[in-house]
Amino acid sequence: MKTFFKYSRYPYLTGLFVGLIVFLCAWGLRTFGALESMELAAYDAFLRFRQAAYDQDSRIILISVSEKDIQNQGRWPLSDATLARVLSILLASNPRAIGVDIYRDVPVPPGHEDLEAVLSKNRNIIAIMKFRGGRKGNIPAPAVLKGTEQVGFADMIVDPGGIVRRGILFLDDGKDVFFSFALRLALLYLSSENIAPQSDPAHPEYLRLGPTTIEPFEANDGGYVGADAGGYQFLLDFKGLSKGFKSYSLTDVLEKKIDPETIKGRIVIVGVTAESVKDFFYTPFSRGHTADQRISGTALHAHIISQLLRFGSGSSSPLATPKEWAELLWILFWSLTGGSVSVRVRSAWRFILIVSAGLLVLGLAGYIMFWRGWWIPLIPPALTWLVSAAIVTAYMLNLEKRQRSLLMQLFSKHVSSAVADTIWEQRDQFLDGGRPRSQNLIASVLFTDLVGFTSVSEHLDPQSLLDWLNELFESMARQVDEQGGVILQYIGDAILAVFGVPVARNTESEISRDAVKAVKCALSMEQTIIHLNQAWQLKSMPTIGMRMGIFTGPLVAGSLGSAQRLAYTIIGDTVNTASRLESYDKEGFKPDVIYNPCRILIGETTQRYLNDQFITQQVGRVSLKGKDQEINVYRVTGEKTKILESK
């Protein structure tokens, strides 16, 4: 019992301790990547929530080669002649840049010379290559463009689950640095506005477009854990994805159905959207892995370009992520808060309300920060908030259950249900680390003992004696309970009752009220014994008398015993004095079992608290057994109000 919930006296310390343990567990899970998929799902959800706020980017035009276009051409891949003709028509409308998102590493006759001439004479055309590295090798750009700045790799970073969330600007093979297809096109467009790539003054290794510095993605940024951070990557925001880009078909170009003003001054990307070519990707906006949830590689390049153009103009900034120590503090805060606020939760509906409110606040905070350009952890703090709150709530409910069981075990057999409820409401006054605490109180103690019990036991067999005692004690207990007293012990044929426990009395009027109730209880007991004796006489059963001692004063109330057998009791000189009053001159008291079966003696302190409500006779200043000092003793013979009522 000494160690029984030893921290219960410090519930908030318990909450903080649980929060710390949950935080360490969550941080471990996050470190090993167990929460990555959920964190990335939250990232995707935030992107989708804000998509409606952005318009279509009119600076980019898509020329799509669909299945119908392939059928119209009667072949795939497109011939070099057809591709050269498409580029020539587009160039006539004066675009700022043209991107060819179609691999052309080998000639596709006829028209190879025509295509080479168009590509070599127009520096604003960018062709794609595939950068694979290692033993797989590359898919080169057209040979005529080798060594020029008209080549960009089309590689994409695909996360587990098949979703593209990051763009890539540079790759290297250990000797050469390669530009991405999207970056090449964006730089061509921005160069017309006198915006060129620069190094950031504070971090020369960082790329700067216009006023915007693009910090390279790190392996553990945001919700990622140990991600492939090769090359120079950045997080994609996919702003305006729901609106898409203005798109025309290959046939529209060949038949010259596009207004030249639509093309003028813009970036044009020629790519394939035909299902048979399978150049499609899933994005954070893909709600499933079905065909209608994908976007073409051409559209994906366009989104990367759009974001780079916004960086260059200063209308958008890269999504930032906090430092690892800041993320740690953020998660720790929610874990400790979840453990702390749940200390006072005592019901399921309050738990649901508090947990839901916390998750709502966390979600709103995460979304607001995301809207302002920061990706802060959401799943780890949500998990720690929920788990800490659940553990602490369960702990406190279990602690409360055990405390209530302990208190009720000690007090329920002594007090009324109303007093028991009061004890539970004020349990902090009664429990100290799971064990009932001692209390210094001022109370009125009542001792009773039977006169002539030996004679009674001689005339009754054991079972009859037990029945007789039960009838007597049940009647006595009823009187104690009616006056708000507590029976602490039955000692053979004696009773120890106290008025003023276990709830402490703090005022003189409350102490006086207890003294009055103790004396009223003694007088009620006397009347009860008179009625019992009359009934017993009619049944030819033994009759009885009783001595009573009452004393009011300080005492200590608390529990005694082992963890398995605790008993609530009182100790102190007040208890001893009440016992000595009961036994004072016991040989001199000869009860009249019908008219005067009881003797009630009280001490001078009790007499002072009675406020002259009772008829008393001074016995004198006497020396009680075992006490050095004499005290004034009084005998109570009746209640004044009842005497007046009878007259």
Image: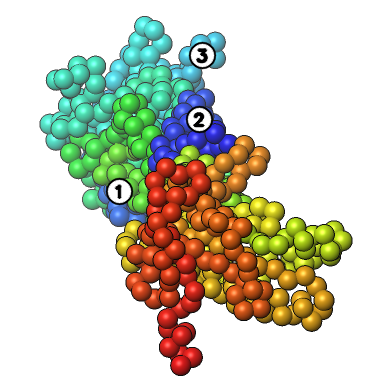
Q: Assign a secondary structure to mark 3.
A: loop
Q: Which mark is residue 25?
A: 2
Q: Could you tell me the amino acid type at mark 3?
A: Gly
* Quadrant including the N terminus: top right
Determine the CA span between mark 3 and mark 2: 43 Å
Q: Is residue 4 left or right of residue 613?
A: right
Q: Position of residue 536 (x, y in %)?
A: 76, 76
Residue at the extreme bottom = 647
Q: Could you tell me the amino acid type at mark 2?
A: Cys
Dot 3 crowding, Cα within 10 Å, few <14, some 14–19, many 20+: few
Upstream in sequence: badge 3 or badge 2:
2
Q: Which mark is residue 546?
A: none
Q: Assign a secondary structure to mark 2.
A: helix
**Relative to 647, does residue 570 appear above or below in the rendering?**
above
**Which residue appears at 53% of the width and 38% of the height?**
5
Q: Could you tell me the amino acid type at mark 1?
A: Ile
- Which residue matches tag 3? 137
- Which residue matches tag 1? 368
Residue at the extreme front = 588
Determine the CA span between mark 1 and mark 3: 44 Å
**Which residue appears at 54% of the width and 44% of the height?**
559
